[in-house]
């Protein structure tokens, strides 16, 4: 059974959506993490705020996952 080219392109597009969002989130978490560690070196009570700000970029990956699922829905 042959697979159509459009199914492969849809799969590739969904992979690019999730990969791009994961790389963007990692880049943002790196920058925020460095700043949070620097702030905690000055004031230890900033740990909670630094932790929350470090976790916020994970929503980018969730958005990318939603887009990838929507793209995969085109194959059906």
Image (cartoon, rainbow, N blue to C red):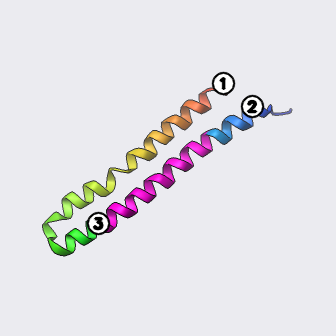
Tag 1–tag 3 contact (CB < 8 Å): no
Does 31 appear in magenta?
yes
Image: magenta residue range? 14-35
Residue identifier under label 3: 35
Residue identifier under label 1: 76
Tag 1–tag 2 contact (CB < 8 Å): no
Q: Closer to the camera: disc 2 or disc 3?
A: 3
Does 17 appear in magenta?
yes
Separation of residues labelled 1 and 2 (CA atoms)? 11 Å
| Magenta highlight: main SS | helix
Q: Is residue 5 left or right of residue 57?
A: right
Q: Is residue 29 left or right of residue 45?
A: right
Which residue shows up at 26% across the image and 65% down it? 36
Residue identifier under label 2: 6
| Residue 2 placement (x, y as % from top left) | 85, 33
Dot 2: element: helix
The tag on residue 13 is none
Q: Closer to the camera: disc 1 or disc 2?
A: 2
Q: Earlier in the sequence, mark 1 or mark 2?
A: 2
Mark 2, Cα crowd under 10 Å, few <14 / some 14-19 / many 20+, is few
| Residue 67 placement (x, y as % from top left) | 52, 35
Mark 3, Cα crowd under 10 Å, few <14 / some 14-19 / many 20+, is some
| Residue 27 placement (x, y as % from top left) | 44, 59
Mark 1, Cα crowd under 10 Å, few <14 / some 14-19 / many 20+, is few
**Quadrant of the snapshot with the N terminus:** top right
Which residue shows up at 60% across the image and 27% down it? 73
């Amino acid at each position: 059974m042959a697979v159509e080219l459009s199914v492969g392109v849809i799969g590739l597009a969904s992979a690019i959506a999730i990969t791009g969002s994961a790389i963007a989130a990692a880049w943002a978490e790196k920058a925020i993490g460095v700043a949070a560690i620097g702030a905690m070196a000055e004031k230890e009570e900033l740990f909670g705020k630094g932790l929350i700000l470090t976790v916020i970029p994970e929503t980018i990956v969730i958005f990318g996952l939603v887009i990838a699922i929507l793209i995969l829905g085109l194959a059906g």
